[in-house]
Image (cartoon, rainbow, N blue to C red):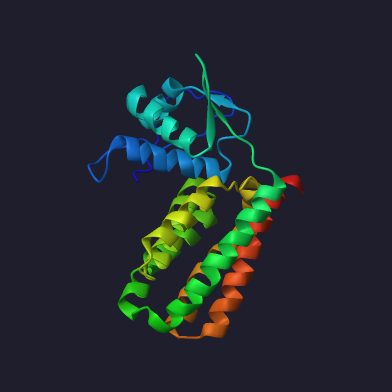
Amino acid sequence: MMRDMAQRPQEADAPALPRLGGRRSSYRERVADALRAALIAGELRPGQVYSAPSLAARFGVSATPVREAMLDLAKEGLVDTVPNKGFRVTAVSERQLDEYTHVRALIETPTVVELARTADRVSLEALRPAAREIVAAAAVGDLIAYVEADNRFHLGLLALAGNAHLVEVVADLRGRSRLYGLTSLVEAGRLLASAEEHLELLDALLERDEKAVREIMTRHLGHVRGLWAAAGD
């Protein structure tokens, strides 16, 4: 997604969102993806109301695709509609985050371990650019780019198992999650270590080291839950 920023005054607490361009997908899809990433990264805060016109100004598009994208996110339970005002970001409880982590571990860990036996090297290597993007985004503190690249890597990896429904379930779980602690981790220099685990995982998969893959996945998902909890530290 293009990272050029709209040069417009910004509302308090509103994230600087990327302008959209190109023809890779519809504006509605691209806006929804960027908004979802902003939600996961904690750039859009729970309880805060955001209007479609204000967000549209930051995307450099009309309010219509933004409003449609927000309605899609409302169906996913990520935001609630506020009549005549906009959309309020829904909160996620600690118990929900624990449950999301548990389900992800049950699904992702054995699936990725199996890929150490079944995935071909070309397909695995194709994920390296996304892994490097995650590290680069973490290094400069670009949280939305971090989440977008992280989604591409993990969902792309799971897609190698050939089960589209599994990918859809994990994508939904990831979308419902929030990483409110990302900013504090960037400031503390801790996000980069978690980002580098993606390259470590990819190397272990290429080496067909199932034990290492399991250990890295377990550690990585534990770090993800730690990111969720970091906001309360």
Q: Is residue 142 visible?
A: no
Report the number of numbered marks. 0
Q: Position of residue 175 (x, y in %)?
A: 51, 47
- Name the spot of residue 73 as percent of width and height, x first: 46, 36
- Answer with the quarter of the image where residue 100 lies: bottom right
Residue 224 is situated, as x and y percent measured from the top left of the image, at: 62, 58
For this view, does 90 lie left or right of residue 28? right
The answer to whether residue 41 is above or below residue 85 is: below
Tell me the quarter of the picture where residue 99 sits. bottom right
| Residue 17 spot, x, y in % from top left | 44, 36
Dividing the picture into quadrants, the one containing residue 69 is top left
Residue drawn at x 40%, y 59% is 165
Taking the spot 61% from the left edge, 49% from the top edge, the residue there is: 182
Residue at left 50%, top 25%? Answer: 10
Q: Is residue 207 above or below residue 182?
A: below
Name the one closer to the observer, 74 or 208.
74
State left or right for residue 45 relative to residue 158.
right
Q: Is residue 138 at least partly visible in the picture?
A: yes
